[in-house]
C-alpha cells in the first residue's frame, strides 16, 4: 500500500493550488484535464512540478528583496 502524503494542509487553498498547477502545465505545453490525468508521462508530470517549484522559489526570492 502506498503512503500518500500529497494532502492540502490548508483546504481553502485547494482551488488556488489547482489553478497554479493548470497554469504551470500550460506554460510547459502539457494539456491537463480537470479529472483523470493518469496518461501523463513521468517527464510531463515532472515538468509541471518542476515549473511550479521554480515559480515558488522565484516568488520567495522576490519577497526577500
Image (cartoon, rainbow, N blue to C red):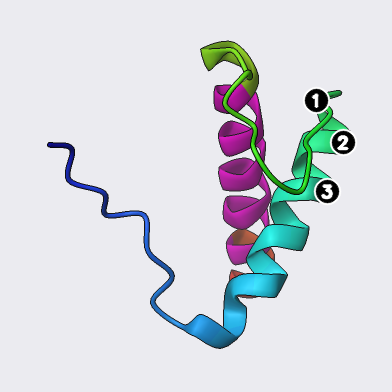
Residue 39 in the image: x percent, y percent? 62, 18
Does residue 21 sit above or below 29 in this rendering? below
User: Badge 1 local density, few (<14 within 10 Å), some, or many (20+)?
Assistant: some
Residue 51 in the image: x percent, y percent? 66, 37
Mark 1 and mark 2 in contact? Answer it, CB < 8 Å.
yes
The residue at which mark 1 appears reads as 30
- Residue numbers of the magenta segment: 45-60
The residue at which mark 3 appears reads as 23
Closer to the camera in the image, 54 or 44: 44
Residue 41 in the image: x percent, y percent? 59, 12
- Residue 54 falls within the magenta-colored stretch: yes
Q: Is mark 1 on a helix, strand or loop?
A: loop
The residue at which mark 2 appears reads as 26
In the picture as drawn, the residue positioned furthest to the bottom comes out as 12
- Residue 7 falls within the magenta-colored stretch: no
Q: Give the main secondary structure of the magenta stretch.
A: helix
The quarter holding residue 1 reads top left
Does residue 65 sit above or below 30 in this rendering? below
Image side of residue 44 versus residue 5, left or right: right
Q: What element carries label 2?
A: helix
Q: What element carries label 3?
A: helix
Residue 64 in the image: x percent, y percent? 58, 71
**Cα–Cα span, label 2 and label 3:** 5 Å
Mark 2 and mark 3 in contact? Answer it, CB < 8 Å.
yes
The quarter holding residue 27 reads top right
If you read the primary sequence from the N terminus, does the residue marked by circle 1 or circle 3 appear first? 3
Q: How many marks?
A: 3
Q: In which quarter of the image is the C terminus?
A: bottom right
User: Badge 3 local density, few (<14 within 10 Å), some, or many (20+)?
Assistant: some
Amino acid at each position: 500500500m502506498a503512503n500518500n502524503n500529497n494532502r492540502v494542509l490548508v483546504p481553502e487553498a485547494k482551488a488556488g493550488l489547482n489553478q497554479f498547477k493548470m497554469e504551470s502545465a500550460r506554460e510547459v505545453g502539457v494539456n491537463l484535464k480537470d479529472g483523470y490525468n493518469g496518461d501523463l508521462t513521468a517527464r510531463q508530470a515532472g515538468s509541471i512540478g518542476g515549473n511550479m517549484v521554480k515559480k515558488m522559489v522565484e516568488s520567495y526570492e522576490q519577497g526577500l528583496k
